[in-house]
Image (cartoon, helix red, strand yellow):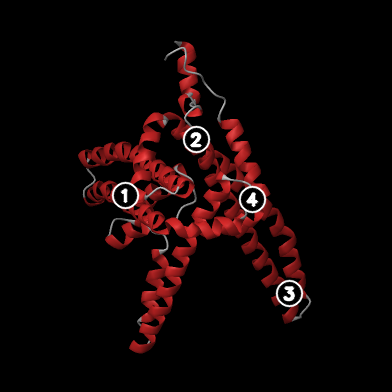
Amino acid sequence: MSRKTKTIVFYRHLIAEAAHFAWRRKLLWIFGLFAGILSTGSVLDITLRHFNRIERVGWTVDQMILGVFPEWDYAEIFRFSAGFLEPLHGRVLFGVMAVIFVIVIALSLRSQSVIITAASNEHIVWKEAWEKSYEHLSDLLLLNVMWKLVQWILLLLTSLPLALVLLEATVANATLYFGLFLLLFPLGIIANTIFNLAIIEVARNRADAMHALHASVSLFKKHWLASLELSIIVFVCSLIGWSVFLLAAALFFIPSTILVTAALLSGLPFLFSFFTGFCIFAYFIGFSFFFGMMVLFQYAAWVRFHERAANRILGKRIFGKLERVWGGSR
């Protein structure tokens, strides 16, 4: 490493800024909730969830689609329910569900743009960010579709050897599955990082999808170690945050149980229904807002990484902790 290359204390400030932004811009939690439908902004978390589904959901076509698109469950429920309806009613229901699906995807894409734009410029208001989100909707859609296809291909390549293991549990098949997993799991993290950075490039710099993908590949090649380190740090922070939320939910469960039990013993059905509905609603609202906040935090962390890494001056400095350790030992 050249002596002229400077290092920079990176992660502590980045995570602190992202956490402060996510806590202060509470209105953006709603956009984080919708953006999380397509991606939570994490990298390692997405990869772990997809590869964890391999052993749990199996390897049929429907199950592998479910591994990449968890929302496929709702399509299966709809398809099953439509079988009990008359043809005309089934077509009407299908049309309504198709419209809802398009609206949800559009909201998710625009929400991605809103939170990335707001994280890039903290002085911008959400209305202005919402108006600008129209400009690159097609590029965000293209990148998200490509991202899902890459995830499906990686999942398929890892699932096929598992099918051989399930059909014939031999040492050779198990070795093949383990070897492919060791190869494809890091590839999954790399692909998720590149597409995550590409989406940020589109929303921040109004680039087209292909240019953003090329720029994110170049950025990853230059700061690949820092990207992987950040993915682990963001995942750990997210894990700690969800642990705190689950602890708070468990503590809330005690008084809510007492309240519902007291309402039940009162012998008043209305009171029991009211308090039960209130507790369920409180849990739902708490989960939704916390989920939106965590998505906002993870996107904000990657936006700040992108800002520093793409900067002509700061981008020449070494970000990775391991890089600084290696450089100091030389």
Can you give x and y, in whole percent of width and height, for residue 36 in the image? 50, 55
Of pointers 4 and 3, the one earlier in the residue sequence: 4
- The residue lying at 47 percent from left, 33 percent from top is 309
Of pointers 2 and 4, the one earlier in the residue sequence: 2
Of pointers 4 and 1, the one earlier in the residue sequence: 1
User: SS of the residue at dot 1?
Assistant: helix
Q: Which mark is residue 264?
A: 3
Q: Which residue is mark 4?
A: 245
- The residue lying at 45 percent from left, 17 percent from top is 326
Can you give x and y, in whole percent of width and height, for residue 102 in the image? 42, 69
Between marks 1 and 3 in the image, the one whose residue lies nearer the viewer = 1
- Identify which residue, 77 or 8, lies in the foreground: 8
Tell me if label 1 and label 2 are in contact, CB under 8 Å: no
Report the quarter where the C terminus lies. top left
Tell me if label 4 and label 3 are in contact, CB under 8 Å: no
Residue flagged by tag 4: what amino acid is it? Answer: Phe
Q: Which residue is mark 1?
A: 150
Q: Which mark is residue 230?
A: 2
User: SS of the residue at dot 2?
Assistant: helix
Between marks 4 and 3 in the image, the one whose residue lies nearer the viewer = 4
What is the spatial separation of the Cα atoms under label 2 and label 4, in whole angstroms?
A: 22 Å
User: SS of the residue at dot 3?
Assistant: helix
Instruction: Give the vertical position of 174 relative to 222 (above or below).
Output: below
Residue flagged by tag 3: what amino acid is it? Answer: Leu
Residue flagged by tag 1: what amino acid is it? Answer: Val
Instruction: Give the vertical position of 302 relative to 312 (above or below).
Output: below
Residue 296 seen anywhere in this rendered image of the structure: yes
Residue flagged by tag 2: what amino acid is it? Answer: Leu
- Identify which residue, 301 or 65, lies in the foreground: 301
